[in-house]
Image (cartoon, rainbow, N blue to C red):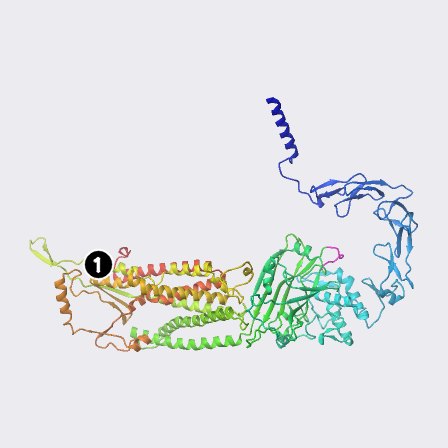
């Protein structure tokens, strides 16, 4: 029993294994191209399967068909067909393949084994009642009146020929007249019967003889002129758009746009459409104006009566709509732009439609494979873009959107690439991808080149000095890229789509310049006062080259503050008024308009950097002295060598107190009123975690949370600067208030502690920052010793109060001296000591220059962010920068301290 069960189990395992693929799970990869001419591709097996006897593969490779000369006996599906060879008496096969037949005289057997009639005749294989005939007949279509018939495309039915043949020759034979595009025209010297240009020149300099232009350009132009054929006129317009609406008024060649302008002139008697001079009846509206150089008329257009606001819960949208045409000129339908009609980049529907939320600046960029464009845009469609809005009567109205095609050439010049609006030649019709005109051999071949709308930008302009939320009709700027087809699977193209909002900022720029000029003047006055103070402190009355250089260095710092004040006010203004508006009144500057602002920020940073270097040089060159007032305690008895005499000398004073004070000074050189690390962490937390960074998006909807759609809304550099500086200054101010008001009062005050250390150590400090000016920290003890008893302390205090005849004067600064930062009294006979309640000696330390350091760190952070659009990266670089400058200041200050005090650097920890 056990052996039988084992055998059964082994048999089942063998059967199961036989059902699995040979190597477990892999399959051979095959496509239709891998199959031979006697195999079909079976999609159910994903493999090539052989056809039966006397069979071959169909043209699509997905089924089998009988060989030429074999009739179909049975057909139970593409796998199960039976074929039988026809007899010599009936060697041909009917068109449906089911019967053998004999061809009549005049007919031939083609490569497929079927009868083929001469031109002008149709093939008849069945009687009227449908009975198969034994001999196929070729019947001539009557091309004369009244039937005017000709074979159809399949050659099995006589149909009425085109009216152009009948009108020209009263038959279906064009005879010696003009036969083009399947149409027949008489020779008229005044008509468009001369040769036309069918070559298309691409950016790379190569030409393509377009099969589409060869087939349709001349025929469409003549049909448009002779018969006012609507689709023919539209087709001519489409071919003009295919060559970028370019025109050369001096040429005699008839390219598509020249033909369009000729038709436009010759059809003047038809009148205009909707009283628009550049829109002729029966003709497409290709050019926004009838003449070159009228781009300035854009600003003369009437603004929309629609009031654009942000009050409602539902966002207002820009209602763009297209009139859509195919290449043959047929009107297809009205189509809204939502859903990615104009956007070549694939994306989710909500993100695509974000582009048309009013007030939202939109930016989308991607890279597409050329093979995808060839497959998706096999047909070329054309669009006339309008904006849909409500008129004063409440009815729907349309306003045409002007197109600024950067590839358009007028008399050989790319006029739309110029900055002067008066030189623009604006158009109306666009396409996204043209895979049609680049086909050279025939219309079914792969194009040698394609044209792609690689950059589309819609600009919306706000009516200036108007608080009613009105805008001018938008304008579309489009740029095409030519791609020579070589390896579509490997070739790619970068495309972008954007919508920007702009307003006239001339007044804002003027106000900014006025503010800069006024504040720069005040800065110059302040810098001159500081320079005069410096001259008094160095004891030099002469104005020389060093004086001028000093003034420029001082002015650099004050001018940096001026630029910062103006840029900070500008950023804060846009942040408040753009994000807080409810009725459209202001728009953010465009990236181009932001250049002046960015230059001002860069100027502020560069000047502040120069000021910081100036401060560091001054701090690292100060003269510092330690005065040890400690008196010896007792005497030391020494014996004189050789003589045996005894000599007493004062006991030496310990140097360790001086070393201790020097180390304390060394340690406080780079302390600050704020904690730089906490500053950066707090700023990043508020920007990225709390979400203040979301206030920088170029849309008027303030929010702290991000959404999936916000990734396609670019950030404004002005808003980034405004948010970053506001948060940085707020955090810094909070730190300073907390540090001075709480931490230094109740926890630790390093500066006051240093003064106390000097007093306890009985050591005074003299710091000379200038030749005739410095700071004195009075650490001398009235008791003579660093340690004394209470009785001696009281006695010495009384002695100090009888001290009047001294060689110095101690006084307070006048209010004016405090304001202008300059000493007005001349020290003639006695040195003047000013009481320093504000601890101004910290000016030679980091601590006394916190304002400069805070602004420099902030400007560095903002400059990096403006360049990278990344707050995290900016914070990392700012932290590294702080550490580098701190290291340099500490190391160089340590060496200066050792050099000026003659203390060995090894004792400075």
**On screen, residue 470 above or below 208:** below
Residue at the spot of label 1: 657
Q: Which residues are magenta?
A: 438-445
Left or right: where 14 falls relative to 283? left
Q: Let me know if residue 620 appears in the view.
A: no
Q: Nearer the viewer, residue 617 or 573?
A: 573
Quarter where residue 464 is shown? bottom right
Q: Nearer the viewer, residue 857 or 490?
A: 857
Left or right: where 648 falls relative to 703? left
Report if residue 219 lies within the magenta region: no
What x and y, as percent, mark residue 819?
Answer: 32, 76
- Main SS of the magenta part reads loop
Report if residue 443 lies within the magenta region: yes
Task: Say which quadrant the C terminus sits in.
Answer: bottom left
SS for callout 1: helix
Mark 1: few/some/many CA within 10 Å (<14, 14-19, 20+): some
What x and y, as percent, mark residue 113?
Answer: 85, 46
């Amino acid at each position: 029993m056990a052996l039988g069960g084992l055998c059964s189990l082994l048999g089942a395992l063998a059967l199961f294994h036989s059902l699995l693929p040979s190597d477990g799970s892999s399959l051979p990869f095959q496509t239709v191209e891998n199959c031979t001419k006697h195999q079909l591709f079976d999609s159910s097996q994903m493999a090539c399967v052989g056809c039966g006897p006397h069979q071959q593969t169909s043209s699509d490779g997905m089924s089998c068909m009988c060989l030429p000369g074999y009739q179909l006996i049975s057909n139970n599906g593409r796998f199960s067909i039976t074929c039988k060879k026809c007899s010599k008496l009936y060697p041909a096969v009917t068109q449906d393949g089911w019967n053998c037949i004999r061809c009549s005289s005049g007919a031939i057997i083609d490569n497929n084994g079927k009868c083929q009639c001469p031109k002008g005749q149709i093939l008849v294989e069945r009687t009227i009642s449908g009975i198969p005939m034994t001999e196929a007949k070729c019947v001539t279509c009557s091309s004369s009146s009244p039937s005017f018939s000709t074979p159809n495309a399949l050659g099995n039915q006589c149909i009425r020929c085109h009216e152009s043949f009948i009108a020209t020759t009263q038959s279906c034979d064009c005879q010696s007249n003009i036969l083009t595009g399947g149409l027949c025209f008489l020779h008229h010297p005044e008509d468009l019967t001369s040769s036309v240009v069918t070559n298309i020149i691409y950016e790379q300099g190569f030409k393509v003889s377009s099969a589409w232009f060869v087939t349709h350009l001349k025929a469409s132009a003549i049909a448009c002129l002779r018969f006012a054929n609507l689709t023919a006129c539209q087709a001519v317009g489409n071919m003009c758009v295919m060559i970028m609406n370019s025109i050369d008024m001096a040429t005699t060649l008839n390219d598509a746009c020249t033909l369009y302008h000729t038709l436009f002139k010759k059809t003047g008697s038809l009148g205009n459409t909707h009283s628009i001079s550049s829109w002729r009846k029966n003709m497409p509206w290709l050019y926004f104006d009838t003449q070159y150089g009228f781009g300035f008329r854009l600003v003369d257009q009437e603004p929309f009566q629609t009031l654009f606001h942000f009050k409602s819960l539902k966002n207002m949208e820009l209602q763009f709509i297209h009139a859509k045409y195919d290449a043959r000129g047929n009107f297809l339908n009205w189509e809204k732009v939502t859903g990615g009609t104009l956007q070549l980049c694939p994306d989710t529907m909500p993100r695509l439609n974000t582009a048309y939320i009013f007030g939202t600046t939109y930016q989308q960029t991607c890279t597409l494979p050329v093979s995808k464009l060839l497959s998706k845009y096999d047909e070329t469609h054309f669009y006339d873009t309008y904006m849909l809005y409500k008129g004063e009567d409440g009815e729907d109205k349309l306003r045409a959107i002007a197109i600024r095609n950067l590839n358009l050439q007028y008399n050989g010049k790319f006029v739309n690439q110029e900055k002067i609006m008066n030189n623009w030649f604006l158009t109306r019709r666009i396409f996204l991808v043209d895979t049609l005109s680049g086909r050279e051999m025939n219309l079914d071949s792969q194009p040698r080149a394609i044209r792609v709308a690689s950059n589309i930008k819609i600009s919306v302009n706000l009516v200036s000095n108007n608080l009613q939320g009105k805008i001018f009709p938008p304008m579309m700027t489009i740029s095409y890229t030519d791609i020579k087809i070589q390896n579509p699977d490997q070739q790619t193209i970068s495309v972008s789509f954007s919508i920007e909002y702009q307003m006239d900022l001339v007044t804002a720029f003027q106000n900014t310049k006025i503010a800069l000029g006024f504040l720069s003047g005040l800065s110059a006055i302040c810098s001159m006062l500081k320079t005069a103070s410096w001259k008094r402190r160095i004891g030099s009355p002469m104005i020389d080259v060093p004086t001028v250089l000093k003034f420029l260095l001082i002015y650099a710092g004050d001018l940096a503050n001026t630029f910062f004040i103006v840029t900070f006010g500008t950023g804060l203004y846009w942040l408040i008024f753009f994000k807080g508006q409810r009725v459209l009144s202001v728009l953010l500057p465009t990236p181009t308009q932001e250049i002046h602002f960015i230059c001002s920020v860069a100027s502020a940073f560069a000047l502040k950097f120069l000021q910081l270097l100036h401060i560091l040089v001054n701090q690292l060159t100060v003269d510092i002295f330690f005065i040890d007032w400690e008196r010896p305690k007792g005497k030391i008895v020494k014996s004189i060598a050789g003589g045996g005499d005894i000599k007493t000398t004062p006991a030496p004073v310990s140097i360790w107190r001086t070393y201790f004070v020097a180390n304390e000074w060394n340690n406080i050189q780079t302390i600050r009123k704020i904690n730089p690390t906490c500053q950066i962490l707090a700023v990043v937390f508020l920007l990225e975690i709390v979400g203040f960074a979301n206030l920088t998006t170029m849309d008027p909807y303030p929010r702290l949370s991000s959404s999936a759609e916000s990734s396609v809304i670019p950030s404004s550099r002005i808003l980034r600067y405004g948010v970053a500086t506001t948060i940085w200054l707020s955090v810094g101010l909070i730190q300073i208030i907390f540090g001075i008001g709480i931490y230094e009062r109740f926890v630790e005050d390093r500066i006051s502690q240093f003064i106390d250390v000097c007093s306890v150590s009985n050591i005074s400090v003299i710091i000379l920052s200038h030749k005739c000016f410095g700071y004195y920290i009075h650490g001398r003890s009235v008791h003579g010793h660093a340690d004394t008893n209470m009785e001696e302390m009281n006695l010495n205090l009384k002695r100090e109060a009888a001290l009047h005849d001294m060689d110095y004067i101690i006084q307070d600064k006048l209010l004016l001296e405090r304001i202008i930062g300059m000493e007005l009294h001349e020290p003639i006979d006695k040195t003047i000591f000013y009481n320093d309640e504000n601890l101004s000696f910290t000016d030679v330390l980091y601590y006394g220059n916190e304002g400069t350091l805070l602004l420099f760190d902030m400007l560095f952070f903002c400059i990096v962010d403006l360049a990278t659009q990344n707050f995290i990266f900016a914070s990392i670089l700012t932290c590294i920068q702080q550490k580098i400058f701190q290291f340099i200041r500490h190391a160089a200050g340590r060496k200066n301290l050792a050099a000026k005090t003659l203390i060995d650097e090894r004792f400075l920890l």
